[in-house]
Image: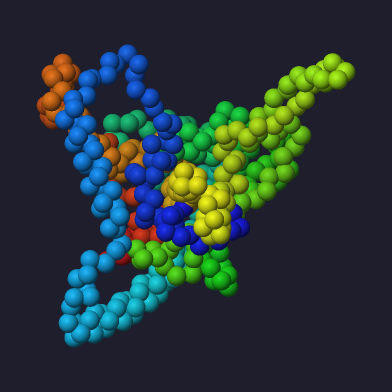
Amino acid sequence: MSSNVPINQPSDITAPTPQNTPLTHAPISAGLSRPTVPDISEDAEPVEETTNVHDAVFGLVQGRLAGLLGKSSGYIESLSDGAKKTIEALKGVQVKQNELQNQYKRECLELEKKYLELTKPLYTRRRALIHATAEPTAEELEAGAAQSAKDDADENPLAVPSSTVAVAVPEFWLTALRNHVGLSELITDRDAGALKYLIDLRIEYLPSSEPKPGFKLIFEFSPNEYFENEVLEKTYVYREEVGYSGDFVYDRAIGTEIRWKDEKDLTKEFEIKKQRNKNTNRTRLVRKAHPTESFFNFFSPPVAPSEEAIETGEIGEDELDDLEEKLEIDYQIGEDIKEKIIPRAIDYFTGKALEYDMLSEDEDDYEDEDEENDDVDDLDVDSDEDDLPPPRRGAARGGSRGGRGGPPANVNPEECKQQ
């Protein structure tokens, strides 16, 4: 939900939006899981000849339909001149409706900015409590205990003597990030060493004076052994006009260049190889760097190819598909940090948010197994619903990315959804 190159994409790539990259369909929804292979212990079932014929016919029909996609059926052209005149007028009405939708989204964005400003004092207070630069108040402790009881009536409240002095919470932000289903797969053990120094994570919207709207994620670090930067930023820029779906469309993403200290670049792995000179037969050791998976690749977003590169065939279809997937993942990470982790950091730290994330999974992500599979009778299935425990929390279903991403935590996101 890149880099400094605007994504003026042709039809080969669909610009990701918070709408067309939903959590339940983007690769990140499955924790960025890697492709799997069939179990080698399973014997392949013989394929009947009729199945091959059916598949061939099905593929032929699909190919024909794909070729017709976007082409005129001739129906509009066959209408009378009077009907065609009405159609043109309807298009004119749609133009005005699009203008109103664009205005609506702009005003919704301003509402988000307003409530972010109202929330900032709470974020400042949260930071002070995390790092124990301030003592909790009796009101805060009472409200926290009441919320814990509301979340789970059977859970015993934390027994803390009133004379206890509050101390800093170790690895708060690292724990919160790792408790996010998708980010947990991106953060390696090596990354964790650096993310232990993350002391604050916040958001800022791009000022209205900027030509395009957007937001900036700010990662603040204490001095550490990995890089010189005290602040790493990731900026997401939207296009000026809303997309066809009625929502802002991502234009590009820009990340901070990380100034790594010697031997500490977490986005690379170093390999020492022995080389032999063909003429002198002498050997030498050569140290080579190879790119590797790391959360910190987040600050080097994928770069969209130019239209010329696509038209000339420099970028193949497979590469375009791979790029589109990377862009979707990148934007999805940004949206989830903005909409989930920052406003509800304590819920991700404690793990409470995981229950809500699981409830947000769409049933459409699952499909029935082969109904003719006789082995289903061998499965131990308990269908007695009376034995099921009640849900621990009454979380309302629905993602936080409906619309363009709802306002901060204390705003009803329904106010900014398209009616």
Colour scheme of the picture:
rainbow
Q: Residue at x 41, y 67 (%)?
A: 242
Q: Is residue 288 left or right of residue 145?
A: right
Residue 273, placed above or below residue 255 = above
Residue 247, placed above or below residue 54 = below
Q: Position of residue 223 (x, y in %)?
A: 71, 40
Q: Residue at x 59, y 54 (%)?
A: 3
Residue 258, placed above or below residue 16 = above
Q: Is residue 186 left or right of residue 288?
A: left
Q: Nearer the viewer, residue 256 or 206?
A: 256
Q: Position of residue 152 (x, y in %)?
A: 30, 36
Q: Can residue 151 be seen in this snapshot?
A: no
Q: Position of residue 403 (x, y in %)?
A: 36, 60
**Which quarter of the rendering shows the C terminus?**
bottom left
Q: Nearer the viewer, residue 127 or 74?
A: 74
Q: Residue 269 sits in which quadrant? A: top right
Q: Can residue 67 be seen in this snapshot?
A: yes
Q: Residue at x 28, y 31 (%)?
A: 154
Q: Nearer the viewer, residue 167 or 274?
A: 274
Q: Residue at x 51, y 57 (%)?
A: 311
Q: Nearer the viewer, residue 231 or 73?
A: 73
Q: Position of residue 2 (x, y in %)?
A: 55, 54
